[in-house]
Image (cartoon, grey):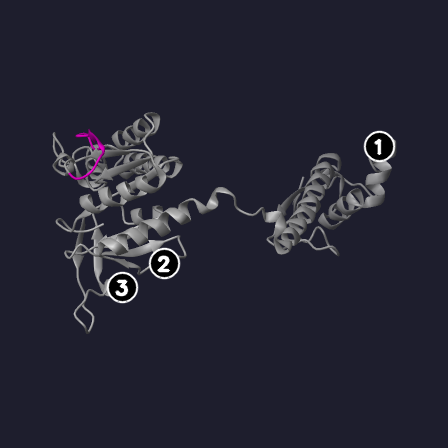
Amino acid sequence: MGESGTGKTWWSLSLATRLCDLEGGKIAFVDTEGADGKAQLYAPYFDFDHMVITDHSPESYINAIHAAIQHGYTIVIVDSFSQGWNGTGGILDITDKAKTGWAESKPRHRRMINAIHDAQIHIIGTVRTKNSYAKTDSGSIDWKNSSVEARQEPEFEYEWDMSAILDHDHKLTLRKSRCFDLPDGTVVSSDDEQTQFVFQLNTWLNAGDTPPHWTENPRQMERADKWITKARELEAYALNIAAATADVDRKEFATPEAYVEALKVYCSPEAVIARAKSRQKPIVPDKKPLTQLTVVSNGAKPSPDDPFADLKVEARAN
C-alpha cells in the first residue's frame, strides 16, 4: 500500500521477479489503470505478461485471477485493487447504482476476496492510500501513530498473509505478517535488504511442504482424545434425548417433574440395554393427560450427576 509515487508498481514487479528467480515460473500483471495500462512502461526492466481490465467490477478481478491460474502463471500482480473500490464499476459505483445498495455490493466483494484466498498461486496486490504522517524524535515516520486511509474496504489489508506500507523514500514497512521471521515492523529499503527479504519469504512459503504430523505432538494427541471422548458423550446424549422425546409422550404426565423423571429413566443405561434386548418401550407409571409439556433449553450445562440440567420443561393446561 502507499500513496501515489511511492513505488508500488516497481516494488511489486521487483518482488515477483526475485521470487521467480528462486522458484521458477512466470508473472502475470493485471493492470487496472487506463485503456493501455501503465505497466508497459516497466517492460524494459522486468519480464512479465500484461493484461488490462477497464471494468473494475469484482467479477473482472476474479476472472483475471482465474485466467492467470488457467494459463500456468505462478505469480499474479494486481495493480491496483483501489480501482475495484472507487473506480468505474467498482464497489462504490455498484452500491450507488443498485436498488439494494450494500446488500448487492458486499457479497460480490466477498466473492473477490474468496477468489484471492482460494488461488493456489502467489498474488501481489497494490492499494492506494491517503496518509497523515506522525514523526519520531529522529524525524523518521512513526507508522504506529500515523493515519493510513486505504482506497479499499477498511479490513481489506487483513485478508492477506502480509501487508506493507511504502513511503516516498520507497522504503517498505510491514504492517501485518504471518511470517515469524518477518514480523510486523520489518523495514526493507536497500537492494540487499530486498534480496534477503525475498529469500526469507520464499523459505517461509515453502516450509509447509512437509510439516510434522500433529500426531507427533503428545499434547495435541491428548487434546484430540479429549475431544473424541466429549463428542461420543454428546452423540450418545443427543441420540438418547431424541429417542426419549419421541417415545415418551409428554401429554401423559401430570407435572413437568414427572416428565423429566421419565426421560431420565428412559435414558438410563439399564433402560437402554433393556430396549436393545427386547425392542420394547419402557413402561412408565402414573400417566395422567392433564397438561401439554414442552422441553426447551435453559442455558445450563449438563453434568454427569445431572445430564438433564440444561432442560427446562414448560407446562400448559390442555
Vertical placement of residue 304 versus 78, above or below? below
Of marks 3 and 1, which one's residue comes earlier in the chain?
3
Residue depicted at x 84% and y 35%: 275
Quick check: is 130 in the magenta stretch? no
What SS does tag 1 mark? Answer: loop
The three-letter code of the residue at mark 1 reads Gln
Instruction: Give me the C-alpha separation between circle 3 and circle 1.
Output: 70 Å
Question: Which residue occupies the foreground of this view, 91 or 314?
Answer: 91
Of marks 2 and 3, which one's residue comes earlier in the chain?
3
Residue depicted at x 34% and y 59%: 184
- Crowd around label 2: few <14 · some 14–19 · many ≥20 (10 Å): some
What SS does tag 3 mark? Answer: helix
Which dot marks residue 121? none
Q: Quadrant of residue 81?
A: top left
Q: Label 1 belongs to which residue? A: 280
Q: Which residues are magenta?
A: 45-56
